[in-house]
Image (spheres, rainbow, N blue to C red):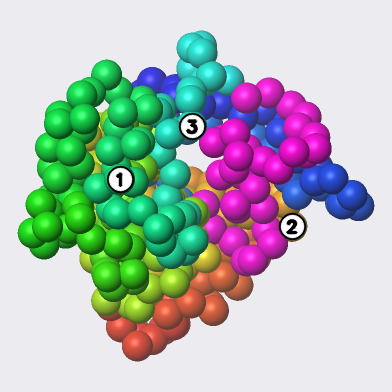
Amino acid sequence: MTLLLGLTGLSVHYPGASAPALADLGLALFEGEKLAIIGESGSGKSTLARVIAGLLPPGSRIEGRIDWGGGPTPRPGRDIGYVFQDPGGSLNPLLSVGRHLTEVLRTHLPLTARDARARAAELLDTVQIPDPARALNAYPHQFSGGQRQRIAIALAIAARPRLLIADEATSALDVLVQAEITALLRALCDAKGMTLLFITHDMALAGQLADRIAVMHAARMVEIGPAARVLRAPRESYTRSLLAAHLDLASPRLVGEAR
């Protein structure tokens, strides 16, 4: 497997914070894999995603090493696509969907206005938005929450990134739409060879999507391993407590409950 990203001794301190948001974290992320990062709110999941994407707030202090497989640092929006939790917050209500997509495409790719609009329609079709040509002229408020998240995914993959980060991208959606978006992310990454970093607090979704699962607690990574092993035979008590608190989407029983 080819290494895409290596983190060594990574710590992050936010301005004015008394404790680190990440503490001495190590991680290897490989080309084409799907890695889920799970943990409770405040565990450091989103901080990890943002430091990788170069989206930390000004004044943040980073310690440790971030190595990109021996190559140059990737560019956010071009080499790294980012899907945020709230699609409403990541889409400008004053801009049409077509304007969103064509601006991203023309910023990062050598496309004419006409070619960018054609590519934008293709992207909407790829993420299963009905009638893409008409949707280009519509505005974010004219779509459902699940459709807005699909549009946000189209924006994130527009420039053909190597790494796609989905930061709690399903948590604001109902359970059926969550399953649809999870399946879409899996299919897109498989079809395009993208590496996926999937940030979630939902063990069931992580198990459906990921090759490996990493568990975070109190700014540290406490466990990482193949998804099946982490879900069936967790080694850490914190991971076992997470499993006990989550519902299995295939059954009304709690994950880990005797059948």
Q: Find residue 218 and name its label.
A: 2
Asked if labels 3 and 2 touch by Cβ distance under 8 angstroms, the answer is no
Q: Residues within 10 Å of mark 3 (few under 14, many from 20)?
A: some
**The C terminus, quarter of image:** bottom left
**The N terminus, quarter of image:** top left
Residue type at mark 3: give it. Answer: Pro
Ranked by sequence position, the earlier of labels 2 and 1 is: 1
Residue ID for mark 3: 76
72 and 255: which one is in front? Answer: 72
Asked if labels 1 and 3 touch by Cβ distance under 8 angstroms, the answer is no
Q: Position of residue 92 (x, y in %)?
A: 43, 56
Ranked by sequence position, the earlier of labels 3 and 1 is: 3
Q: Residues within 10 Å of mark 1 (few under 14, many from 20)?
A: some
Q: Residue at x 30, y 45 (%)?
A: 99
Question: Residue placed farthest to the front in the image?
Answer: 94
Residue ID for mark 1: 99
Q: Where 31 falls versus 100 (above or below)?
A: above
Q: Where 228 falls versus 25 (above or below)?
A: below
Q: Which residues are magenta?
A: 37-66
- Asked which secondary structure carries label 1, the reply is helix
Residue type at mark 1: give it. Answer: Arg
- Residue 164: quadrant of the picture: top left
Is any part of residue 5 visible from this angle? yes
- Asked which secondary structure carries label 2, the reply is loop
Q: Residue at x 42, y 50 (%)?
A: 83
**Viewer-nearest of discs 2 and 3:** 3
